[in-house]
Each structure stands twice: as structure tokens, then as C-alpha cells.
């Protein structure tokens, strides 16, 4: 009597269960601000000063007193230039009926309450005489003045714990004098593929490939995705389709890694050894997830290490990594918001084959602002992931007509 198959698990339920097992790493490492791009903060960053530290000019021009300019314009009287203030220097108090030549970033002298751009002034300077300027427009109070603290106030949290740092974040940290940042340590990930059919590029020339063998593409994109997510990756290569070899690889990988990630061998065939090998050393849940591509998925524990097994078909492996492994690794690093942003876009294609599973169709934006669909959506056609620039998230049982509005997840949201 056959055992009935478990129902397919919805993606949202699988992701929620997976994230529930992702206890954030606690170890902190202090890293140069130069080297922290893409890493995750382990502590809040609090500013010890205000930025800017004092009022300064946002333009090259002249620092003025508004009342003096108003008075001078009635009689078209030039005002004397009595000082020159460059960035990094400090001016003196501005006297009545005088202006200060000032440059971008230079502090506003006491008494000045506006800056006039040099383009709105005529410089008058006779030989041997002090310089004067004729100001051709009446500035508003505070014009072209950047106020002290308008960017950052002292004591403010400028970057928050769990925040994934961007180039702009690094600049902001530097602006308050931070040269070392407290970061969650990199997740240590062991990666290997299973399958006697796999061959590494460079080991065998294409014309010498034996029937039934294929080049190992998954190893390359999975490693690249892990590195983009800030992981410290140990590449264990290709493990033969032997139970003993799979057990040995898992046992070795579990010693010094937070996650073991495999590709292939998570089905239930006679040559799929991941399930019994993991169960020999730890615990395993083998899921059939209601997504297309990417139905087979495994997760569990090998001793103290997390284990995730991805399907072997390249697009299935690619998509399940983006939808499940990526948020899991971000949560391990303490990131709270791990869901990618999606946009509403218009389908410039039809999809008449509704599936009972949630589908992720490879598509790309066109010049008309809509989405084109790659013609072959097979789980083995990796070309679709290169040609496309995102995934159409199509709910179960739904067809798509030309002109329908669909949910589109750009790869830019998923590939880093």
C-alpha cells in the first residue's frame, strides 16, 4: 500500500518556518569603514557631534547682511569686500555695509544672514583700491546657508543595528568620524554539489564530454550569490553519489560552518543520498514547496550547523536560493526586513497555462515600460535568468492576459 504524499507547502509557510530557525549570529567583529560595504551592523551607531558642525555656505559667492543689501539697493551702492573665507578657515564678524568673499563649505561669519551667488554680483575693483561688489538681487534670509546640525544632530542614531550597509552608509559613518564599525561576523557557509554526472569546466573539453555528463553550473552561481551576501564560503567541490562520501562531507563541513548548502540529491531516488546522510548525523525536513520552478527543498541540522539542500536543476536552484536561502542568510546576520521589494508592472505577454503552484516567471522590462517573457520557462534553461531582469510572481491557478498588471520582483532586489 503506497503512502500518500504530503501536501505541497506554500512558499510563505516554508519561508516563515525557515526564518524561525535562523537565530542571528552573536559574534561581533570590528571592521574598517572602508571594508564594510554590504555587511550588517551589530550595534547602533550614535553620532558624537553635529553635522555640519556650524553654519556654512552651500555656494561660492558673498556672505552678506540682508538689511545692508536692502539699503544698498535703494541707491545702487556697492558694498566693500572686507575678508575672504575659504573652507577650513574661520572669518571675523561681518561689519555693517560690508560683505565677505566666501566659498562652498566655508563657515558663515558672525553677523551674516544670507549668501549671494557670485553670478548675482558684479565685482568692482579699481587699481590700488579695495574690492567692492554690486549685488543685483535681494537675497532671502538664510539663502544658501547650510545650518549646523541640519544633516546629523549630536546623540542621534545615524545607522541602526541590523542595517545592511551601503556606500552611502559608509560615507555617513565617516562624516561623524567613524573609522571602525561593529559588524555581525560573516556567516561561514560550506558549499558542495552532488552528482556523478557533474564535470568542472576546464577539467574536460566540451568535445570530450561523455554522454550523460554536464558541466557544474550551480556551483558557480551559488558561490557568487553567497559572496554577495557577505558569507565566508568554503567550496567543497563535487561529492560523489555515494552515501558514505556524502556522510563524510557533511560531517567535515559541520565542524566549522554555520550553514551547509548543497545542490542536487534532495529528491527520493536511489541515487539521492542527501536525505539518509543528513538523518544519520542530525535532523532533516524534506519539503515539496508549492512553487515552480523549485519544488524539492530540504532543511535541517547537521550537528550544530544549519543544512539546506537545493534542487539540482539550475533555474530551480537559482530561484529557491533567491526566495529562501537569501532571506535566511540575511536573518542570520540580524537583518529584520528580508522581503524583497516588488513593483506592479504591465504584462506584454500572455500566460495561458495556469499551474497549481506559485510560479516565478523570468521576464524583463521593455522600452514601453511593460514586461516581456522569456519564451522557454523550463527549470533547466539558465539562459532565462541571464536574459531576464526579474521574476513575475504569479499566484497559483492564475493565467495572465496581455495588459494584466502583475507583481514583478527585480533581480536588483534579489542579487545582493
Image (tube, helix red, strand yellow):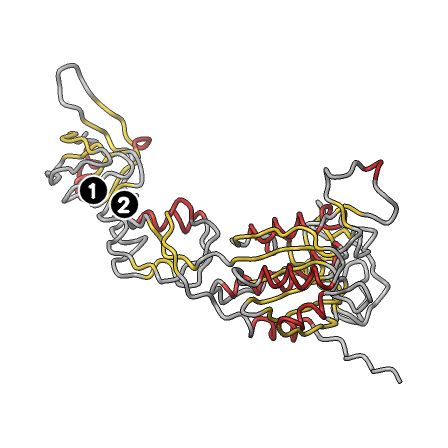
Kindly check if marks 2 and 1 are in contact, taking CB atoms under 8 A apart as contact.
yes
Within the image, what quadrant is residue 81 found in?
A: top left
Mark 2, residue position: 145
Across and down, in percent, residue 340 comes to 59, 61
Side of 102 relative to 379 (left or right): left
Q: Residue at x 13, y 30 (%)?
A: 82
Within the image, what quadrant is residue 247 found in?
A: bottom right
Q: Which mark is residue 10?
A: none
In three-dimensional space, the C-alpha distance between marks 2 and 1, rounded to whole angstroms, equals 8 Å
- The front one of 357 and 145 is 357
Name the outermost residue toward the front: 244
Across and down, in percent, residue 104 comes to 29, 37
**In this view, 122 is above or below 9:** above
Q: Residue at x 74, y 54 (%)?
A: 314
**In this view, 344 is above or below 136:** below
Mark 1, residue position: 108
Amino acid at each position: 500500500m503506497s503512502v500518500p504524499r504530503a501536501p505541497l507547502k506554500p512558499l510563505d509557510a516554508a519561508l516563515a518556518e525557515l526564518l524561525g530557525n535562523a537565530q542571528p549570529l552573536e559574534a561581533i567583529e570590528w571592521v574598517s569603514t572602508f571594508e564594510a560595504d554590504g555587511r550588517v551592523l551589530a550595534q547602533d551607531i550614535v553620532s558624537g557631534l553635529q553635522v555640519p558642525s556650524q553654519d556654512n555656505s552651500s555656494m561660492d559667492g558673498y556672505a552678506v547682511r540682508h538689511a545692508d543689501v536692502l539699503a544698498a539697493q535703494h541707491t545702487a551702492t556697492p558694498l566693500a569686500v572686507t575678508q575672504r573665507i575659504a573652507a577650513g578657515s574661520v572669518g571675523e564678524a561681518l561689519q555693517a555695509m560690508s560683505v565677505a568673499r566666501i566659498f562652498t563649505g566655508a563657515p558663515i561669519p558672525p553677523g551674516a544672514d544670507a549668501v549671494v551667488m557670485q553670478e548675482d554680483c558684479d565685482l568692482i575693483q579699481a587699481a590700488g583700491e579695495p574690492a567692492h561688489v554690486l549685488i543685483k538681487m535681494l537675497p532671502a534670509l538664510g539663502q544658501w546657508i547650510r545650518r549646523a546640525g541640519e544633516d546629523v544632530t549630536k546623540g542621534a542614531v545615524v545607522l541602526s543595528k541590523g542595517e545592511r550597509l551601503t556606500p552611502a552608509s559608509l560615507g555617513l559613518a565617516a562624516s561623524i568620524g567613524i573609522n571602525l564599525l561593529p559588524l555581525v561576523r560573516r556567516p561561514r557557509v560550506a558549499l558542495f554539489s552532488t552528482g556523478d554526472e557533474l564535470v568542472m569546466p576546464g577539467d574536460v573539453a566540451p568535445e570530450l564530454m561523455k554522454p550523460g555528463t554536464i558541466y557544474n553550473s550551480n556551483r558557480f552561481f551559488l558561490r557568487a550569490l553567497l559572496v554577495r551576501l557577505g558569507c565566508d564560503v568554503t567550496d567543497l567541490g563535487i561529492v560523489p553519489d555515494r552515501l558514505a562520501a556524502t556522510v563524510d562531507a557533511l560531517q567535515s563541513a559541520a565542524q566549522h560552518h554555520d550553514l551547509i548548502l548543497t545542490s542536487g540529491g534532495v529528491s527520493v531516488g536511489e541515487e539521492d543520498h542527501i536525505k539518509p546522510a543528513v538523518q544519520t548525523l542530525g535532523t532533516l525536513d524534506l519539503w515539496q514547496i508549492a512553487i515552480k520552478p523549485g519544488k524539492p527543498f530540504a532543511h535541517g541540522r547537521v550537528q550544530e550547523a544549519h543544512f539546506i539542500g537545493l534542487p539540482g536543476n539550475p533555474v530551480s536552484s537559482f530561484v529557491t536560493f533567491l526566495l529562501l536561502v537569501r532571506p535566511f542568510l540575511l536573518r542570520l546576520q540580524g537583518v529584520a526586513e528580508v522581503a524583497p521589494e516588488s513593483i506592479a508592472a504591465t504584462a506584454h505577454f500572455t500566460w495561458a497555462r495556469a499551474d497549481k503552484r506559485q510560479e516565478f516567471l523570468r521576464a524583463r522590462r521593455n522600452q514601453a515600460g511593460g514586461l516581456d517573457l522569456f519564451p522557454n520557462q523550463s527549470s533547466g534553461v539558465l539562459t532565462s535568468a541571464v536574459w531576464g531582469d526579474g521574476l513575475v510572481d504569479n499566484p497559483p491557478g492564475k493565467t495572465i492576459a496581455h495588459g494584466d498588471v502583475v507583481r514583478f520582483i527585480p533581480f536588483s532586489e534579489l542579487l545582493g
